[in-house]
Amino acid sequence: MSQSSTIVLLPFIAAIITFVMVFYGRERAGSMTSHNFLSAVGSVVILASYLLLRVVEMMSFTLNIVYAAIGVALLIWAIVCTRI
């Protein structure tokens, strides 16, 4: 893995932590169908697919940029969810 792969993971990790904190903190883990819980699960699935592609060495540079953009979008969505 290159050094840029660690930077790509940071928005994903921040988004997952934010979704989980909002789910448990504000919603008291009340519903498994809440948008925060489903967003956290979706973030983990996307993160797992990223790591799988890195392990099997099928990740191109452009796909790396796409995953970085998805991670930033998820982080922005997590921040917006904390305001709702």
Image (spheres, rainbow, N blue to C red):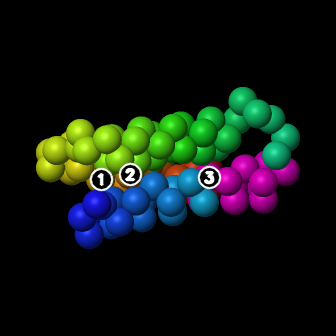
Kindly identify the amino acid type of the residue bearing the numbered disc 3. Answer: Phe
Q: Dots 2 and 3: beta carbons under 8 Å?
A: no
Q: What residue is disc 2 on?
A: 71
Residue 2 lies left or right of residue 47; in this view the side is: left
Name the one closer to the observer, 66 or 1: 1
Mark 3: give few (<14), some (14-19) or many (20+) Cα within 10 Å. many
Q: Dots 2 and 1: beta carbons under 8 Å?
A: yes
Residue extent of the magenta highlight: 18-28
Q: For the residues marked 1 and 3, what is the alpha-carbon distance in whole angstroms?
A: 18 Å
Residue 68 numbered mark, or none: 1
Residue pictured at 17% horizontal, 44% vertical = 60
Magenta segment includes 27: yes
Nearer the N terminus, badge 1 or badge 3? 3
Q: What residue is disc 3 on?
A: 19
Residue pictured at 60% horizontal, 39% vertical = 41
Screen quadrant of the N terminus:
bottom left
Nearer the N terminus, badge 2 or badge 3? 3
Identify the element where label 1 is drawn: helix
